[in-house]
Image: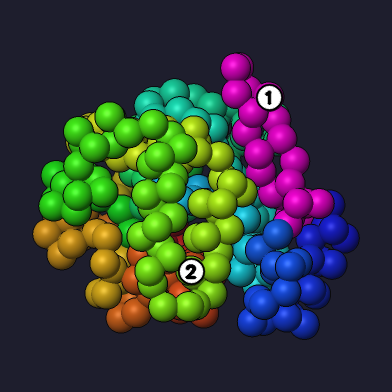
Amino acid sequence: MEALIARACTRMSRNPSPVTAEQPWHLDAAIRSARIGAHDWPYIDTGGNRPALVMLPGSVGTCEMFFKQIASLRDRLRIISVGYPAEPDPATLAAGLAALMDTLNLSTASVLGSSFGGYWAQFFALRHAERVETLFLGNIFVTPDELFANPLFAPDFVRATAAADLQATWRGRVAQAPDSELKRIQLDMLDGRQSAENLRARFLGVIGATLCPPLPVPQQRIVIVDCADDPIIPPASRQAVRDRYPQAEVATLPTGGHYPHILNPDAYDAVIVRRLTNRSTA
């Protein structure tokens, strides 16, 4: 597995500006899948005897969305990037992640969730606090109310729209953006690399989100990562996360939008490395 990932990372270094048919975030050969209950859980595991970090993408994206962290951090951390199934319920997802960790013989790990992945990561920490070393909450919301101002997050729209139509609507929105690496990645996902059913399930999870009960994890083991220029999570939502976890470490990046792991990876990685290589704060 490590050799497969190493070859993919070498390809990335040779092609930092993706313009060919073989994109650097295409890590097909490294993706494995575990059958958990009725669902398949795809994941990439860099392996090795290193501190483990489970990474959960947001609504748009597969386990490949953290391809830059897989490349840059694999020599210092064991990265397990997880593409969770088409399931909107955070408690069900939390149970599935616990079972996946059992399958990987992983008793504890740090957990990083981005956007919706970070929202339901709270529920994993709620039910499996003893398995969480550090909880990274990246570009998340605690309740979705402020997101509803965006018509694409309107609950009636999401519930009434078929999966393929929802995917096409989001693809049309992304297609209007200026050309960029992020745009190409998102279009790739919305062209079918991520299934329409999976995408819709995650948006149903967003619009149905409720406030997670207080966590049994000490807040000193929580790190909030957000971006001053996030176009999806408005300032009121970012403040609500800080208010929910007033004793947590807060790392606000000046740039990175809603995808700092792609748009500002050096700063994003620095937050992770600083925390996970300084065990005195854990």
Residue 11 shows up from this direction: yes
Q: Nearer the viewer, residue 28 or 53?
A: 28
Residue 222: numbered disc = none
Q: Nearer the viewer, residue 207 or 135?
A: 207
In reply to whether residue 211 is colored magenta, the answer given is no
Residue beneath the point at 60% across and 17% down? 38
Front label number (1 vs 2): 2
**Which secondary structure, mark 1?**
strand
Residue beneath the point at 48% across and 69% down? 183
Residues at marks 1 and 2, CA–CA distance in whole angstroms: 31 Å
Q: Nearer the viewer, residue 237 or 280?
A: 237
Residue 183: numbered disc = 2
How crowded pointer 2 is (Cα within 10 Å; few <14, some 14-19, many 20+) is rated as: some
> In the image, residue 274 lies at what x, y percent?
49, 72
Q: Residue furthest top?
A: 37
Residue under numbered circle 1: 35
Query: In the rendered view, how is the structure colored?
Result: rainbow
Say which label, 1 or 2, has the lower sequence index.
1
In reply to whether residue 38 is colored magenta, the answer given is yes
> In the image, residue 92 lies at what x, y percent?
44, 23
Quadrant of the image occupied by residue 50: bottom right
Q: Is residue 110 left or right of residue 161?
A: right
How crowded pointer 1 is (Cα within 10 Å; few <14, some 14-19, many 20+) is rated as: few
At label 2, the amino acid type is Lys
Q: Nearer the viewer, residue 212 or 26?
A: 26
Q: Is residue 8 above or below residue 229?
A: above
What's the magenta region?
A: 27-54
